[in-house]
Image (cartoon, grey):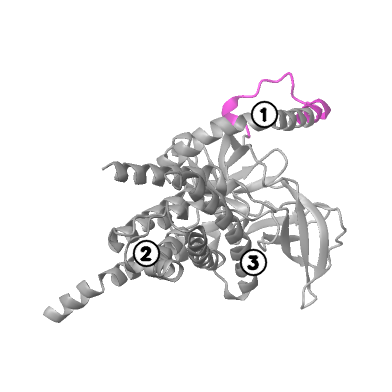
């Protein structure tokens, strides 16, 4: 019960931070971090994948609602939610097989690998759909790279600051 | 039958993924085409309320700048009033015969974006302030966009910084007309296309709205010519226009409603038949 409340609060706070602060950074003109995906990163592993998919879709649609972007965030979040086990397996290996990952106690290196894989995937889908033009592939890759770096740094810092204090 | 159920149950995650991804794709594609009803947009009570709270905090930070803009506009308007020779100052004009052509509404900008391929603004006036679709939105410096969607108390404005926007514009010095588009590259530069190569185009000239549509009145400022070059065919110019407005910093906008709109549209419909 306590945990559910924590996840609901995290969901709302991340959306508010995203639309109030992160969407307005526009570093160097167009670079914004998309930190709301931290919610999908830290979603409990033992929970069913169906719930994760539905919650991610809801998260994406809400972000789309605020930023007038059609359905691009929803699509990217759903892809990330679906591919999350793959990212977990690649970065945590045996720990994931045994279902014993605790994000607050894992090795920092593994955690960062996981964040990098997941962020790259999410941003690639996001910007491909946002620009929606295969001939601007360079622009898509450029945006993915720069926004990705920003998101990776910010989300690593946020996870370290807020989730890893129970050691 | 049994096998179908088994298949669905075995692949339920993948099927749900496909379903949700399909919905998102449909929403994305639908948002890329103009003139369709939009489900997901920021002109609703929830987002309007949140952005209103954020705006009520954030608006204090640029009060000084907004004051400056208002003072400049006042100065300009006052000099226009003082320099206009009033011919009928002593005659009372019956208000029912007044030739009022535009209704002006003031609105606060709650949300503004300028980095996406299609940018929108959310403003705090909606249906109950008689804002409808296809009204012009300007600031004291120049054009901003066109109202695209309304809810009861909020409206969404399609910015000129959008792949979907097409605005009729002309050179101020001559009457050569073209259409204004945006190539999504810089929030300060828009492109004016289809200007005849007979026009004398000079760097620094002013571009203003053409007034051919019923949305924008004639002569609202857009920007100045930055560079220009001939089209591949050599018949028309493509002009890079530097906007008067800083699209990344818009606080208060005016919404213009053409009161003769219905009459003009009726006339055009009649002459088309």
Is residue A100 or residue B193 the one in the foreground?
Answer: A100
Label 2 chain ID: B
Task: Check the image and name the residue furthest to the left.
Answer: B2
Q: Which residue sits at x=61%, y=44%?
A: B137
The image quadrant of residue B72 is top right
Q: Quadrant of the N terminus of chain B?
A: bottom left
The residue sitting at the top extreme is B90
Q: Are marks 1 and 2 on the same chain?
A: yes
1 or 3: mark nearer the eye:
3
Closer to the camera in the image, B211 or B23 = B23
Q: CA distance from mark 1 to mark 2?
A: 42 Å
Count of numbered labels shown in the rendering: 3
Q: Mark 1 Cα within 10 Å, few/some/many (few <14, many 20+)?
A: few
Q: What span is in magenta?
A: B77-99
Instruction: Say if labels 1 and 3 share a chain.
Output: no
Q: Position of residue B71 (x, y in %)?
A: 75, 27
User: Which residue is found at the position 67% from the left and 63% from the top?
Assistant: B183
As drawn, the label of residue B47 is none
Would residue A160 be counted in the magenta stretch? no
- In the rendered structure, find residue B23 and report the number of the disc placed on it: 2
Separation (CA) of disc 1 from disc 3: 36 Å
Name the residue that disc number 1 marks: B63
User: Mark 3 and mark 1 in contact (Cβ < 8 Å)?
Assistant: no
* Relative to B20, residue B233 above or below: below
Query: What residue is pinned by disc 3?
Result: A142
Towards the viewer: B194 or A144? A144
Q: Position of residue A19 (x, y in %)?
A: 51, 46
The answer, for residue B39, to whether it is visible in the render is no
Q: Secondary structure at mark 2?
A: helix
Residue A89 at x, y percent in the picture: 40, 70
């Amino acid at each position: 019960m306590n945990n559910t409340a924590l996840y609901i609060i995290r969901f709302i706070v991340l959306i508010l931070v995203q639309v109030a602060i992160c969407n307005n950074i526009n570093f160097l003109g167009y670079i914004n971090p998309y930190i709301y995906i931290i919610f999908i990163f830290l979603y409990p592993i033992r929970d069913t994948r169906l719930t994760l998919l539905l919650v991610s879709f809801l998260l994406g649609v809400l972000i789309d609602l605020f930023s007038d972007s059609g359905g691009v965030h929803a699509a990217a979040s759903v892809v990330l939610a679906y591919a999350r086990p793959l990212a977990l397996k690649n970065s945590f290996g045996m720990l994931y097989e045994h279902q014993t990952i605790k994000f607050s106690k894992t090795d920092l290196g593994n955690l960062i690998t996981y964040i990098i894989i997941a962020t790259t995937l999410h941003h690639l889908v996001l910007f491909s759909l946002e620009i929606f033009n295969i001939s601007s592939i360079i622009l898509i890759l450029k945006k993915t790279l720069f926004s990705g770096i920003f998101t990776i740094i910010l989300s690593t810092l946020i996870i370290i600051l807020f989730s890893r204090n129970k050691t | 039958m049994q096998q179908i159920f088994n298949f669905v149950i075995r692949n339920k995650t993948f099927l749900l993924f496909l379903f949700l991804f399909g919905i998102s794709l449909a929403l994305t594609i639908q948002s890329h085409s103009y003139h369709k009803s939009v489900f997901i947009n920021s002109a609703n009570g929830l987002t309007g309320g949140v952005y209103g709270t954020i705006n009520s905090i954030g608006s204090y930070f640029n009060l000084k700048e907004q004051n400056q803009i208002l003072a400049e506009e006042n100065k300009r308007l006052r000099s226009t009033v003082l320099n206009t020779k009033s011919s009928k100052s002593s005659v009372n004009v019956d208000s029912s015969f007044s030739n009022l052509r535009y209704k002006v509404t003031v609105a606060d900008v709650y949300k503004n974006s300028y980095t996406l391929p299609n940018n929108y603004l959310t403003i705090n006036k909606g249906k109950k302030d008689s804002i409808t679709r296809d009204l012009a939105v300007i600031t004291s410096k120049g054009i901003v966009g066109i109202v695209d969607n309304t809810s009861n108390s909020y409206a969404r404005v399609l910015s000129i910084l959008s792949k979907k926007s097409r605005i009729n514009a002309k050179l101020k010095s001559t009457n050569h007309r073209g259409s204004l588009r945006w190539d999504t590259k810089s929030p300060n530069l828009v492109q004016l296309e289809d200007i005849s190569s007979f026009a004398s185009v000079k760097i620094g000239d002013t571009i203003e709205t053409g007034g051919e549509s019923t949305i924008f009145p004639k002569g609202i400022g857009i920007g100045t010519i930055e560079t220009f070059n001939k089209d591949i065919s050599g018949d028309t110019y493509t002009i890079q226009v530097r906007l008067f407005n800083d699209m990344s910093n818009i606080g208060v906008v005016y919404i213009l409603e053409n009161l003769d709109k219905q009459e003009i549209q009726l006339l055009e419909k009649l002459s088309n038949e």
